[in-house]
Amino acid sequence: MQDIEVPDEVIKHILRKHRDIALILNIKDVNKLKHIIIDALSRPDEVYSDKYRVKYFLKRIDEEHWLNVVVQEDIVRKFRRKRWL
């Protein structure tokens, strides 16, 4: 993994606004989620990028779910709008 920043505000946003992800990952605290995101960045199953230079690091969680970590300018970001290839 290159030097990608994982801001605490993004982690807190995920835990607060996307509780389904926390349930699927069976996590309750900021540190565990941050560790999972760092793992997805360092060992992704797939990586894509778009014309805006945003990268999408995908990590398979189980047979049905993928974790999608959005990185723009070497910072993990909240996914603001739909930009699929």
Image (spheres, rainbow, N blue to C red):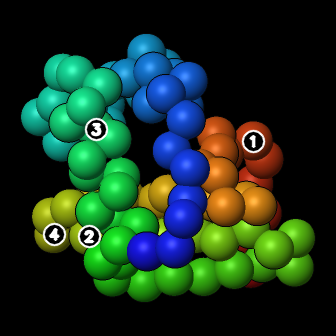
Real-space Cα distance between discs 3 and 2? 15 Å
Nearer the viewer's eye, disc 4 or disc 2? 2
Callout 1 amino acid: Arg
Q: Position of residue 70 (x, y in %)?
A: 59, 57
- Residue that numbered label 2 is attached to: 60
Mark 3 vs mark 2: give the one in front.
3
Can you identify the residue that label 1 sits on? 80
- As drawn, is 73 to the left or to the right of 35? right
Q: Residues within 10 Å of mark 1 (few under 14, many from 20)?
A: few
Label 4, label 2: how far apart the Cα atoms are: 8 Å
Q: Is residue 31 above or below residue 82?
A: above
Residue type at tag 4:
Glu
Q: Which residue is mark 4?
A: 63
Between the residue at mark 3 and the residue at mark 4, the CA separation in whole angstroms equals 20 Å
Q: Which callout, 3 or 4, points at the residue further toward the start of the chain?
A: 3
User: Which numbered disc covers residue 30?
Assistant: none
Q: Which residue is mark 3?
A: 33
